[in-house]
Image (cartoon, rainbow, N blue to C red):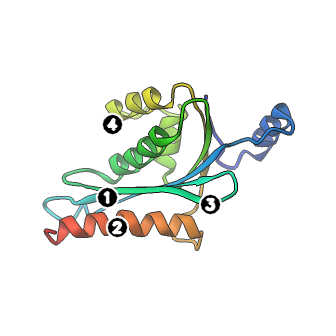
Amino acid sequence: MVKNDIGEMEEKEAIIEHLGAEIVSSYVAYTDGSNDNNNPIRPAGAAYVILDSKGNEVHRASKGFLNKTNNYVELMAIISAVNWIPQGASVVVYSDSQYAINALSGYFRPKTNLNLIEKFFEVSRGKEVFFQWVKGHNGNKWNEVVDKMANNEYQKLKHGK
């Protein structure tokens, strides 16, 4: 199940009401991608942090890529985070990428990265995935953490490390 919750609080409240007193998500994931399109090798980074239902960090990862767009690494961060989530669990994915959220929740059909969209649906089978947009560079602790992790990955590639 994939749900986009960008500014749609009534829909989220309906889901919570439908689920009753159950915990809506077992996990929370913060994801981000970063790149430098002005560099000839187009270094990029993807990162995610997983929190449990009590807000404790349980996992984090990041990876660098060459010749990839920002949309590509935003999608890779989400795919990687959802892939880490165990079968049968649910996750709320926080991302500052409206492109990624809208593409993965079916609000529009992108013309590129179709292999990543397919991969997302593959790794999300048997899991409940909800999306929440978070404004980037706005002081959200975990969004800032994953932004820094993704940026560090592309900086390492940019400087040949």
The type of residue carrying mark 3 is: Asn
Q: Which of 81 and 119 is in front in this view?
A: 81
Marks 2 and 3, the one that precedes in the sequence: 3
Q: Are marks 1 and 3 in contact (CB under 8 Å)?
A: no
Where, quadrant-wise, is the C terminus in this rendering?
bottom left
Task: State the residue position of label 4.
Answer: 113
Category of crowding for the residue at label 1, using alpha-carbon neighbours closer than 10 angstroms: few (below 14), some (14–19), many (at least 20): many
Q: Nearer the viewer, mark 4 or mark 1?
A: 1
Taking 128 as reference, is 144 left or right?
left
Label 2 element class: helix
Q: Within the image, what quadrant is residue 51 found in?
A: bottom right
- Residue at left 46%, top 63%? 146
Mark in front: 3 vs 4 = 3
> In this figure, which residue is indicated by the disc labeled 3?
56
Residue 96 seen in the figure: no
What SS does tag 4 mark?
loop
Spatial CA span between label 3 and label 4: 32 Å
Q: What x and y, as percent, mark residue 10? A: 80, 42
CA distance separating discs 2 and 3: 23 Å
